Amino acid sequence: MPHIIKSKIRTIPHWPKEGVMFRDITTLLKDKEGFNHMIDLLVQRYQDKEIDIIAGIESRGFITGSVLAHRLGLGFVPIRKPGKLPHETVSEEYELEYGKSKIEIHKDAVEKGSRVLLVDDLIATGGTALAACSLLKKLGAEIVECSFIVDLPDLGGKKKLMESGYNVFNLVEFEGE
């Protein structure tokens, strides 16, 4: 029942800038029924899929991804902002609305041929998720699916991922709101 999940997500108007409706999942995370229901829905979706490891994008993807990995009996790999990982890394630069950013993963994070579930809290324009997919592919991984709590369809990120050949799943969406 994704409507339960959606009802637990707070909207903060005009943050971080004028005109943006920020979807704050911290209210979902602190709600024991909502959080557990969300994880249960994801476990149901992925328990019978052939997944070797879960990768989560900094920082909210760490929360959902690590709990889901634990529940599925899998390992977890963080995809982080530059300078946060202590060992040798591979990086990917991507475009932001006003400039560029970069994410990194350890070179030994996944084995070649690993079937990876990529997890984050929200898909907006898709830049970060596409960069994360590119990083995983550089390491020889196969992306089983990209999984998000929230999709903002007006920003087109899910469509970009799908057009790039990735399977995409989200629990809820906030369209035109």
Image (cartoon, helix red, strand yellow):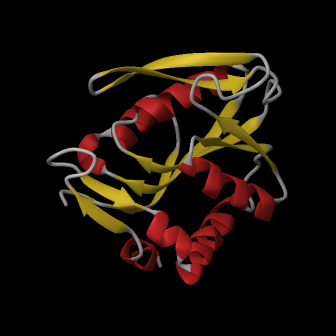
Q: Is residue 94 above or below residue 23?
A: above
- Which residue sits at x=55%, y=51%? 60
Q: Is 173 rendered above or below residue 58?
A: below
Location of residue 140 (image quadrant): top right
In front: 91, or 162? 91
What residue is shown at x 57% (from left), y 23% (from top)?
Answer: 134
Picture quadrant where residue 38 is located = bottom right
Examine the rendering and report whether any part of residue 172 can be seen: yes
Looking at the rendered structure, the number of numbered marks drawn on it comes to 0
In the depicted structure, whether residue 95 falls above or below residue 46: above
Residue placed at 66% from the left, 69% from the top? 44
Q: What is the quadrant of the C terminus in the image?
A: bottom left
x 67%, y 16%: residue: 90
The answer to whether residue 70 is above or below residue 31 is above
Q: Is residue 165 visible?
A: no
Residue 5 locus on image (x, y percent): 45, 73
User: Residue 128 location, x and y as percent?
Assistant: 46, 32
Check the image and name the residue furthest to the left.
19
Question: Residue 165, how many percent across, how many down?
Answer: 49, 31
Left or right: residue 25 versus residue 57 is: left
Camera-nearest residue between 169 and 174: 174
Is 152 placed left or right of 148 in the picture?
left
